[in-house]
Amino acid sequence: MDIFFFMVFMVSTSNAFADDGHRAVKIIKPVHKALVSNPVEICMEAYGLEVESTKNGVNEGKGHHHIMLDMYAPVFFEMDKPLKKDSKFIHLSDGSACIKLDFPTGRHFIRTLFARGNHIPYSPLISDTIIIHIK
């Protein structure tokens, strides 16, 4: 079972530094495989992109972070619609790069996904994934 999750993780992180004008996002806090306690501060950096509030509209090369909790990579054919918003899809619509969240004890997958002001992700996906463990 762990081999399966490792393979999913490796495939899902392959877009982290996709070469589309060197556009990328990276989860910088916590680090991959970190053992942490609640609340967990999750911070992202964007490279070749400008992070801005959704109030600024839809602008090429600009957008905001989304965090997907304990989910697999989104399916490409679903990416032409705005990302949903629920307990597993967190929007940082204000243009922030960090958020504090509480998790149940155990292992969790955290994925960041960069999207335009209308919450529609770039293609190819601009994403990064880490695994953390909550004590």
Image (tube, grey):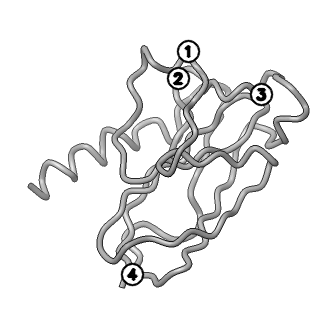
Quadrant assignment, res 81: top right
Place of residue 68 in the rendered image (x, y in percent of width and height, measured from the top left): 48, 47
Earlier sequence position, callout 4 versus callout 2: 4
Q: Amino acid at mark 2?
A: Pro
Q: Amino acid at mark 3?
A: Gly
Q: Which residue appears farthest toward the left when viewing the image?
A: 1
Earlier sequence position, callout 3 versus callout 2: 3
User: Foreground mark, 1 or 4?
Assistant: 1
Q: Which residue occupies 13% across, 58% down?
A: 2
Earlier sequence position, callout 1 versus callout 2: 1
Q: CA distance from mark 1 to mark 2?
A: 11 Å
- SS of the residue at dot 3? loop
Crowdedness near tag 1: few (<14), some (14–19) or many (≥20) residues, C-alpha within 10 Å: few
- SS of the residue at dot 2? loop
Q: Which mark is residue 80?
A: 1
Q: CA distance from mark 3 to mark 2?
A: 13 Å
Residue 74 higher or lower than 4, as above or below = above
Q: Which mark is residue 124?
A: 2
Q: Which residue is labeled 3 in the image?
A: 61
Q: Amino acid at mark 4?
A: Leu
Q: Which residue occupies 50% across, 51% down?
A: 87
**Tag 1 and tag 2, C-beta contact below 8 Å:** no
- SS of the residue at dot 4? strand
Side of 30 where 117 appears, left or right: right
Earlier sequence position, callout 3 versus callout 1: 3
Place of residue 62 in the rendered image (x, y in percent of width and height, measured from the top left): 79, 32
Q: CA distance from mark 3 to mark 4?
A: 34 Å
Place of residue 19 in the rendered image (x, y in percent of width and height, measured from the top left): 56, 29
Crowdedness near tag 2: few (<14), some (14–19) or many (≥20) residues, C-alpha within 10 Å: few
Crowdedness near tag 3: few (<14), some (14–19) or many (≥20) residues, C-alpha within 10 Å: some
Q: Which mark is residue 23?
A: none
**Tag 3 and tag 2, C-beta contact below 8 Å:** no
